[in-house]
Image (cartoon, rainbow, N blue to C red):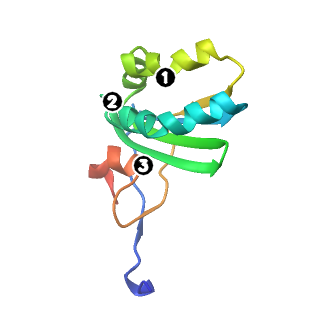
């Protein structure tokens, strides 16, 4: 059990105009083909995103047997857009083009406007702006 006396919370001071973006994307399977494709490719999708130029951190979570969500932190919107133009993303989208009804996909991009709360090791935006930790 953690000692609550040593539990420290911190925030980060974001730059006036942060370039970083948070990308949230999800996959819901709609049929058998989508289900098997998602589970076959999930580790590859996660690792290819995490290795992409400009991606600082990637988190993936299983919402249920038919849904996953991924959150990635990018140095800039330009880096994220470059990833969309790359080979890994093209390979990801091939299945969707061939099977347009098999998956429900969604994505949202956010720019930070205030710090989150953190404890211990930097995660998320704190990995992008570690020198601003207060």
User: Upstream in the sequence, badge 1 or badge 3?
Assistant: 1
Near-viewer residue (23 or 16): 23
Mark 2 crowdedness (10 Å alpha carbons): few <14, some 14-19, many ≥20: some
Which is closer to the viewer, label 2 or label 3? 2
- Tell me the residue at 69%/25% (across/down): 102
Q: Is residue 119 left or right of residue 113?
A: left
Q: In this orientation, which residue lies closer to the viewer: 4 or 38?
A: 38
Closer to the observer: label 1 or label 3? 1
Q: Which mark is residue 92?
A: 1
Label whose residue precedes the other's in the sequence (1 or 2): 2
Q: Is residue 2 visible?
A: yes
- Identify the secondary structure beneath mark 2: loop
Q: Quadrant of residue 84?
A: top left
The image position of residue 134, as x and y in percent, is 34, 60
Instruction: Say which residue appears at 37% left-offset and 82% top-offset.
Output: 6
Q: Which residue is mark 2?
A: 52
Depicted 45 relative to depicted 78: above or below:
below
Mark carried by residue 124: 3
Q: Are marks 1 and 3 in contact (CB under 8 Å)?
A: no
Q: Secondary structure at mark 1?
A: helix
Q: Is residue 18 visible?
A: no
Label 1 to label 3: alpha-carbon separation: 24 Å
**Viewer-closest of 105 and 16:** 105
**Residue 61 in the image, given as x and y percentages of width and height:** 54, 49
């Amino acid at each position: 059990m953690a000692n609550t006396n040593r539990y420290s919370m911190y925030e980060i001071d974001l730059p006036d105009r942060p370039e970083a973006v948070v990308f949230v994307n999800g996959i819901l399977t709609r049929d058998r083909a989508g289900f098997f494709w998602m589970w076959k490719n999930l580790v590859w999708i996660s690792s290819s995103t995490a290795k992409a130029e400009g991606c600082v951190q990637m988190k993936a979570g299983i919402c249920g047997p038919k849904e996953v969500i991924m959150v990635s932190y990018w140095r800039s919107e330009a880096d994220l857009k470059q990833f969309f133009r790359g080979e890994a993303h093209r390979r990801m989208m091939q299945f969707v083009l061939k099977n347009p009804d098999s998956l429900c996909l969604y994505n949202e991009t956010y720019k930070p406007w205030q710090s989150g709360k953190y404890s211990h090791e930097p995660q998320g935006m704190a990995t992008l702006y570690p020198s601003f930790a207060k």
